[in-house]
Amino acid sequence: MRMRRTIVGKRPHAELQHLIYTVFQRPTKPESAEGVCIVFTAALHNEGVTYVVRRLGQEMAQHEDKNTLIIDSAYLQKLTPVDLEQIAASSRRESNRYCVLTADSSEGRHAESSPWKSDRGFREQCLRTLKSVFDYVLIDCSPIGHDATAASLAPISDGVVLVVEAGRTRRNHIQFSEQILRSAHGKVVGYVLNKRRYLIPDWLYARL
């Protein structure tokens, strides 16, 4: 996958389509039936990761006709083997085009009963299973400086996309995030510049 920079502002449709076509591509091997799993994270809090992931997931489900899963890292950390089997069985049975699993969806479950944090093999199994039933798995992750979740997912996913807020995130924040991901043997496949304000009028922008 090639690294791409995408801008999400007032006209998100075209920009998100660009990201889909250039980053979220199926494996090149024709015999591979696996989906693609991408981790979304940021250097700082409130950079719009959840917004970007949700918009992108909706775009994929509606216009790409693909089964798309949005899942946040808090939900993943509460997963048990039984939960994983239930998600896979439900997806195969219902063929959901767009499925969202968040921490609120796992209310009543306790992270202490999940082997997620202590067992890398289980984390790998989770992503393999999700990719076997969904074409696209988009993981909404907490900021890199907040906890180690993004770094732990980076080497076992198909890549990481960093969401950057225009006018707020500094170069050193991005470099720090990249360094952590490289140290974890992860791969940054793209950047999303979020909340950019277009100073060019819409009618003129369309002619450029």
Image (tube, rainbow, N blue to C red):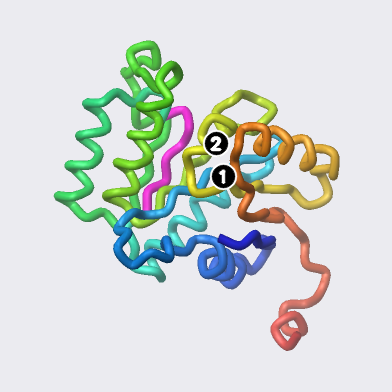
The secondary structure making up most of the magenta span is strand
Quarter of the figure with the C terminus: bottom right
| Distance CA(mark 1)–CA(mark 2) | 6 Å
Among the 4 quarters of the image, the one containing residue 207: bottom right
- Whether 96 is among the magenta residues is no
Image vertical order of residue 89 relative to residue 22, above or below: above
Q: Which residues are magenta?
A: 68-75
As drawn, which residue projects farthest toward the bottom? 207
Residue 44 in percent (x, y) is at 72, 35
Q: Amino acid at mark 1?
A: Phe
Write down the residue under mark 1.
40
Is residue 62 found left or right of 42 in the rendered image? left
Among the 4 quarters of the image, the one containing residue 10: bottom right
Residue 21 in percent (x, y) is at 52, 69
Q: Within 10 angstroms of label 2, few (less than 14), some, or many (20 or more) residues? A: many
Quarter of the figure with the N terminus: bottom right
Say which element carries label 1: strand
Mark earlier in primary sequence (1, 2):
1
Residue located 19% across and 43% down the image:
90
Residue located 63% across and 45% down the image:
48
As drawn, which residue projects farthest toward the left? 93
Q: Which label belongs to residue 141?
A: 2
Q: Within 10 angstroms of label 1, few (less than 14), some, or many (20 or more) residues? A: many
Q: Is residue 145 visible?
A: yes
Q: Which label belongs to residue 181?
A: none
Is residue 28 found left or right of 16 in the rendered image? left
In the image, 133 versus 75, the foreground residue is 133
Image vertical order of residue 82 relative to residue 110, above or below: below
Q: Are marks 1 and 2 in contact (CB under 8 Å)?
A: yes
Q: Amino acid at mark 2?
A: Cys
Residue located 32% across and 59% down the image:
32
